[in-house]
Image: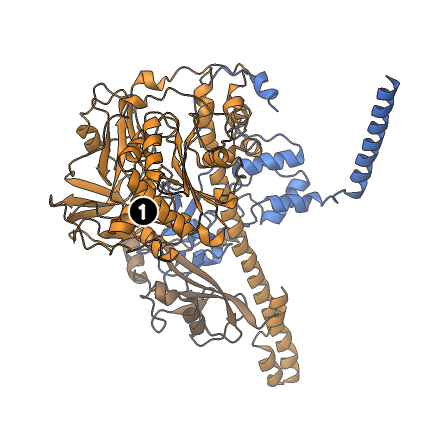
Amino acid sequence: MWIAIGSLTVMGLVMGGLLGVAARFLAVEENPLEEELKSMLPGSQCGQCGYVGCSQYAAALAKGEAAVTLCAPGGKVLIESLAKKLGVKADLSEHEEKVPEYAFIHEDLCIGCTRCIRECSSDAIMGANKLMHTIIIDACHGCGKCVPVCPTDAIVMIPYKVTLRNWHWPKPEIEQAHSEHEVEHAH
Amino acid sequence: MKLFPILGGIHPDYRKERTSEKAIVAMPMPATLYIPLQQHIGAPAEVLVAEGDLVRKGQMIARNQGTVSASQHAPTSGRIKAVTEVAAPHPSGLPQMTIVLESDGKDEWADLPEPIADPFTADMHTINDRVAQSGIVGMGGAAFPSAIKLNLGEQKKLEILLLNGAECEPYLTCDDRVMREYPDEIIDGARIMAHALGTPRIVIAIEQNKPQAIGIMTKAASAFPEIRVVGVPVQYPMGSERHLVQAITGRETPARKLTADLGVVVHNVSTTRAVHHAVRFGRPLVARVVTVSGGAIREPNNVLTPIGTLVSDLVEFCGGFAVRPESVVNGGPMMGQPLPSLDVPVVKGTSGILALTAEEINDSQTSSCIRCGNCVTVCPCGLSPIDMASFIRKDKLDGAAKLGVMDCFSCGSCSWVCPSHIPLVHYFNYAKGALNDLERERSKGDRVKIFVESRTVRLERAAEAKRATLAARKPASDNAAPGNAAEAKPAPTTEEKANA
Amino acid sequence: MSDRINIEVVYALPHEQVLLKLQAPQDTTVDGAIRLSGILEKHPEIDPGRNKLGIYGKLTKADAVLRDRDRVEIYRPLLADPKEVRRKRAEEGRAMKKGGGESAA
């Protein structure tokens, strides 16, 4: 019996020691929180959060001045990960998950004034003075800032179409009488 | 031949006897056919015809485009009525571009490509080109363009061409019938494909609940020493490519790898037969055998169906419904998908049309999980279905992803075995789609980020140039030396930009 | 850096936008980049002599020399006559908006 106790004690000490050493030598240097938050944000500088760009929102988040729910393009996933990072509880009751959209220009109304081009933070509108303006859908992050500046209301936001390629089954709705504790000890 | 066990699996009630003894019958040509541009994994084919064009049977009417795609051919002769959007044979019922062909009743063949005289001396490209040109896709259901799979021999060292005749889904008997009625065509096609792939061996795997097919195929293969016909255990999902490879070789295909990485290429037996037709006669894939069955069908049968036939016409040919079906399923009852309407076409991947009654579906009320662990036991991928479902129910998709939900291939064994009728596989179907959405959004976000960054660089560059101009102008006005200004003006910031 | 520059060539239609990234030798011109990109084969309706060309929203001559990270843009003409649009909107009683200048500032 003493052998068992002894060997387990030795193993415990050795392994504990190893963990300690590893924690010291393999430690990842902590980035400043602000940088980390910034890297989590979409980086499209759309300004829908009310701040000038993603960096400013990240700074405000780091200081605890801004709510985690302000980034529309990031959606619920981002809200949850920001909340986790900052150790706060996200209030999702106000949050309305936005359907992804892109801007579309009605060509018969475009007068080539370039106002929308100047407004776009991702160079997603191609065109020049008195020439047709066209949205490059791949570059459009759907912030909608080009819509109000158009003098002829030629720009509309269009939700991405559900096609055979991106359709998927909805979440099953049947609410079973799953007891909650069952879920808890699943992990 | 030594076989190896596969993980998990179930033994459902097979109900194959309803059609297994029914010889294949050809249905009469419907008046109108609907040929979708996309009947396969990959990019839709590019339309080659317009409204009003006259076409003949076997004529290419849409060409494959891009790396993964398959062409479409006219299943009969007639007139193109329209190229328009028609509901797809898909649970969403969403429309897709479809060629509508009105039959002229003559069923006249077009001038087909010449048969390849001696395929066993032909170079692999000749065979692969013919397979690609003939619009052949995997006919077991996945509908992956076959020519691409035949090119694997160029990239990898392959040992075995494995013919999948397992047909492990309940009800389905189309492969069984094709094996029993056309064994020589299958074997000829297989030998041609093995030649193109460079595989020295061919293994034909058939589940042991099809003794006639095993007997007939064994006899047909006896002349060829490189071919082995193997009866594999009756165990759903034996017909899954990865599981069949494991049963034959004992090796597991790693996640996100191909069976070809283990030296095995798997093709369905009906696909092989289509290759035989393409190589020996120049005939493209314009019809397939479909099992029409289920408790609600009056005369269950195995029907040689022109591609593009409406499911409603096919059901009509089989005597219509004896009782109102609870659900009409495209494919087998385990992995098939419900059809929202009968006005959708039969496509190259349609192995079965099942009209199931409420008793056959057994859609009972869901109750609490009793933690019996059966779903974990039967999961052929070694996943833990109930834990993944718990995460998904709480919208923690990343948790489910960590447990490997993306490796689930929706065989449905977990749902089938669950005593509480929890719709486990539905959770996974939803989660896989939602995770794909997230991935698409993420990659879109990354692309937009690049645009934003390059805009930032550009604006900085412009500001820099402006400053340089201003700085140059000041001394210029002071010293009244216009030469300096002219030199500084053309924003010579190329190097700075390169560094930026 | 090397003697090659990274540039893009863009041609945009309402439902299809082609954005080609390419590496080109130094001293490549706008016209040269368009030819090099292969976009003329994909969209034969483009006529580099007739379509107006530019770099990031600024009209440019076809023989202008490109710099690293330039985006060559092939424009299409307007469909509407701006005067006509303005007149119509006035008739319908909708004023031309001043644009977002004030709100953005």
Q: Residue at x 39, y 51 (%)?
A: B195
Q: Between B321 and B91, which is closer to the camera in this rendering?
A: B321
Q: Between C16 and B231, which is closer to the camera in this rendering?
A: B231
Q: Which residue is mark 1?
A: B275
**Which tint is chain B?**
orange
Query: Is residue B495 rendered to the left or right of residue B134?
Result: right
**Residue A28 visible in this rendered orientation of the protein:** yes
Give x and y (percent) for residue C47. 34, 70
Report in which chain the residue with disc 1 lies: B
Give x and y (percent) for residue B197. 42, 50
Q: Between B388 and C28, which is closer to the camera in this rendering?
A: B388
Q: Between B330 and C67, which is closer to the camera in this rendering?
A: B330
Q: Quadrant of residue B321?
A: top left
**Which tint is chain C?**
brown
Q: Is residue B148 above or below residue A171?
A: below
What colouring style does the render use? Answer: by chain
| Quarter of the rendering occupied by the C terminus of chain A | top right
**Which tint is chain A?**
blue
